[in-house]
Image (tube, helix red, strand yellow):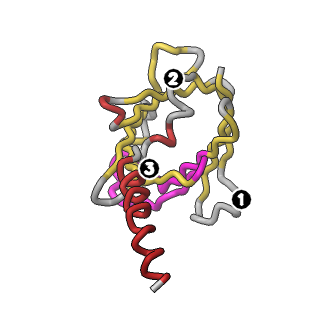
């Protein structure tokens, strides 16, 4: 009987918590990146909210030519897949399209990335971790395998200025 009484009192609290989780913006993990310029070598990356905070737009520039966008990706929450999806384009002549499927876990965005070179229809995915180290620093690591403990293909640290 005591268990039933406890359960009756806990059910509304669990229901409210679950509703809060559902109502929370799945893109909120990007908020630390928004409205800043993130520098790495001769590159700068920006992030901004899209309409109604239902998307995030990221752009990459070369510092020698800041008027010319090199990459642009739009990130949105996909309600059916229950994942963040991103679709990107680049000025690179050999890459036609970039597709992402991702989720935040704490301060890390884990992504599966498909990069489609021009004319090639099937590609093998790579894996990325965007790790927010603090409010003005993140590292982007790329891997051939989904094992984040393996040696990364690349690792780039970005500093907010």
- The Cα atoms of the two marked residues, 1 and 2, are separated by 31 Å
Label 3: how many Cα within 10 Å (few below 14, some 14–19, many 20+): some
Q: Where is residue 124 in the image (x, y as percent from the top left)?
A: 46, 61
Q: Can residue 98 be seen in this view?
A: no
Viewer-nearest of discs 3 and 2: 2
Give the SS element for disc 2. Answer: loop
Q: Which residue lies furthest to the left in this view?
A: 80
Magenta segment range? 106-130
The residue closer to the viewer here, 40 or 56, is 56
Prevailing secondary structure class for the magenta stretch in the rendered image: strand
Label 2: how many Cα within 10 Å (few below 14, some 14–19, many 20+): few
Which is more N-terminal, label 2 or label 3? 2
- As drawn, the label of residue 35 is 2
The residue closer to the viewer here, 126 or 34, is 34
Count of residue discs: 3
Q: Position of residue 42 (x, y in %)?
A: 64, 23
Tell me which residue sits at (65%, 19%) in the image. Answer: 161
Residue named by callout 3: 115
On the rendered image, what quadrant is the N terminus found in? bottom left
Relative vertical location of residue 159 with respect to residue 151 in this rendering, above or below: above
Which is more N-terminal, label 2 or label 1? 2
Label 1: how many Cα within 10 Å (few below 14, some 14–19, many 20+): few
Residue named by callout 1: 151
Left or right: 96 in relation to 134: left
Give the SS element for disc 3. Answer: strand
Which is more N-terminal, label 3 or label 1? 3
């Amino acid at each position: 009987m005591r268990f039933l009484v406890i359960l009756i009192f806990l059910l509304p609290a669990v229901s409210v918590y679950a509703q809060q989780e559902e109502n929370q913006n799945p893109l909120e993990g990007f908020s630390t990146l928004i409205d800043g310029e993130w520098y790495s070598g001769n590159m700068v990356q920006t992030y901004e909210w899209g309409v109604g905070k239902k998307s995030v737009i990221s752009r990459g520039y070369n510092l020698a030519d800041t008027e010319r966008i090199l990459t642009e990706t739009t990130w949105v929450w996909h309600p059916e897949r229950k994942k963040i999806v991103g679709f990107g384009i680049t000025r690179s002549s050999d890459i036609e399209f970039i597709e992402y499927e991702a989720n935040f876990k704490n301060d890390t965005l884990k992504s599966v990335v498909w990069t489609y070179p021009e004319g090639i229809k099937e590609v093998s995915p790579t894996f990325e971790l965007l790790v927010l180290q603090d409010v003005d620093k993140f590292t982007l690591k790329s891997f051939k395998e989904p094992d984040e403990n393996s040696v990364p293909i690349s690792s780039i640290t970005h500093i907010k200025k």
